[in-house]
């Protein structure tokens, strides 16, 4: 783990409402199969949490259900891994029916194997009662309930996916641009700047969960549809990616992806890689893509900006806040649009819609 990862974990923890009282780092090589943390690290966490009266241990990695349980027992603390934390933030953020279905589905799929282990543990505590003790019966009931709920949510989600497909079919003749990028890169701010919309913006991860689409006047009367969507993060839980299929299909079908990168981020390359990993997992890595380095207004280090310009010569450098670089961005989108429209049955303006 490097310093940037811990900074991000701290930010995620605070977004989920936790107060960070201390940090412990373990080398990758010392992972212990049963508890994830080594004996020495467990002691270190125990001492630190005793001093700071901490009640929750957050890990930057994902633990197996058995590891979480073992670690929690040894430390007598609640243990939440990276996926658990991200799911928690998503569920706090989910406002619409669609987002709620997607998040709950991912949460239940995450919970199911953990529920099992928890009850196995309880029935083991019953000691020698036999394999069909009361704990296990309860476990089976609980698992069935969770599975039934998962089934119901999946059916509801299927309806949402269909609905979105129908919506997109109506727009298939339009040129479609999707904003993608690491969470907090400034996608929604850029979306608002380009479309004069007013979607929710916040200096916290995962401010956006639901996609929004608006008409976007590119240049010289040409128009496209621009979509703002959920942000990505390192190790985005696969259950979440799968649940957000309805939302992410939009991205996979865009004619152009604008990859928004926070130019002030110290680990720019790590963030770009994380976004490309998610794009790959949703089958969108091959879509035409244009990098937009955002927030250049607050890059204080001119040298690092020059470095980025040299390293990413095809990218646009802009500020959604001061609007610097937006004309160049429109021009770059226009070039892609003309290339795409040439020889294809596309119109340069969506029918029956006017700019907001
Ligand atoms: N200085 C500066 N800040 C910006 C710029 N663009 C966005 N921000 C800030 O960055 C923070 C995140 O902006 P959002 O637009 O919510 O970012 P996002 O990528 O949509 O984030 P999620 O939806 O959470 O994934 C907010 O505090 C914005 O005000 C910019 O060009 N310059
Ligand atoms: Mg957003």
Image (cartoon, rainbow, N blue to C red):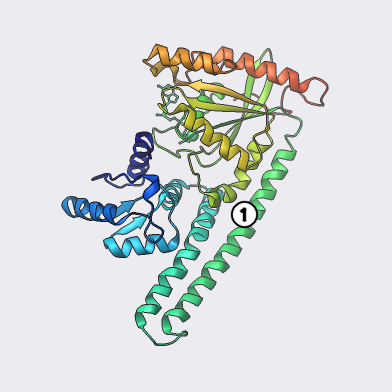
Q: Which residue: 39% across, 61% down?
A: 34
Quadrant of the drawing holding the N terminus: top left
The residue where tag 1 is placed is 157
Residue 114 image position (x, y, % from top left): 45, 64
Is residue 89 visible to the viewer in this orientation of the structure? Answer: yes
Residue 292 image position (x, y, % from top left): 54, 22
Q: Is residue 161 left or right of residue 129?
A: right
The response on whether ligand 1 sits within 8 Å of label 1 is: no
Quadrant of the drawing holding the C terminus: top right
Q: Quadrant of ligand 1?
A: top left
- Against 191, residue 20 (above or below) is below
Residue 324 image position (x, y, % from top left): 49, 13
Q: Nearer the viewer, residue 26 or 77?
A: 26
Q: Which residue: 69% across, 20% down?
A: 336
Q: Is residue 24 left or right of residue 62?
A: left
Q: Nearer the viewer, residue 254 or 67?
A: 67
Q: Which residue: 38% across, 60% down?
A: 68
């Amino acid at each position: 783990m490097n310093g940037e990862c811990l900074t991000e974990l701290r930010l995620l923890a605070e977004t989920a409402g936790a107060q960070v009282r201390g940090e412990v780092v373990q080398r990758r090589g010392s992972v212990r199969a049963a508890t994830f943390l080594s004996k020495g690290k467990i002691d270190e966490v125990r001492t630190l949490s005793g001093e700071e009266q901490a009640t929750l241990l957050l890990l930057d990695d994902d633990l197996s259900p058995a590891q979480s349980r073992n670690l929690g027992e040894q430390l007598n603390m609640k243990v939440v891994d990276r996926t658990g934390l991200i799911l928690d933030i998503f569920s706090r953020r989910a406002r619409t029916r669609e987002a709620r279905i997607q998040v709950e589905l991912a949460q239940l799929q995450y919970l199911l194997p953990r529920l099992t282990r928890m009850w196995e543990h309880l029935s083991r505590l019953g000691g020698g009662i036999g394999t069909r003790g009361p704990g296990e019966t309860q476990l089976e009931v609980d698992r069935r309930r969770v599975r039934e709920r998962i089934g119901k949510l999946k059916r509801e989600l299927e309806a949402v996916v269909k609905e979105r497909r129908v919506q997109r079919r109506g727009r298939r003749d339009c040129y479609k641009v999707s904003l993608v990028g690491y969470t907090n890169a400034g996608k929604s701010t850029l979306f608002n700047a380009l479309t004069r919309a007013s979607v929710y913006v916040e200096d916290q991860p995962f401010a956006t969960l639901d996609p929004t689409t608006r008409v976007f006047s590119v240049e010289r009367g040409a128009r496209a549809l621009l979509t703002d969507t959920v942000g990505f993060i390192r190790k985005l839980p696969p259950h979440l990616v799968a649940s957000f299929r309805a939302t992410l299909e939009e991205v996979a079908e865009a004619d152009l992806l604008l990859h928004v990168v926070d130019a002030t981020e110290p680990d720019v390359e790590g963030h770009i890689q994380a976004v490309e990993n998610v794009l790959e997992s949703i089958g969108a890595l091959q879509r035409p893509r244009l990098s937009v380095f955002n927030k250049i207004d607050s890059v204080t280090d001119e040298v690092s900006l020059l470095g980025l310009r040299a390293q990413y010569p095809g990218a646009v450098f802009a500020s959604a806040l001061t609007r610097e670089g937006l004309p160049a961005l429109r021009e770059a989108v226009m070039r892609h649009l003309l290339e795409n429209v040439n020889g294809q049955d596309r119109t340069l303006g969506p029918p029956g819609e006017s700019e907001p």
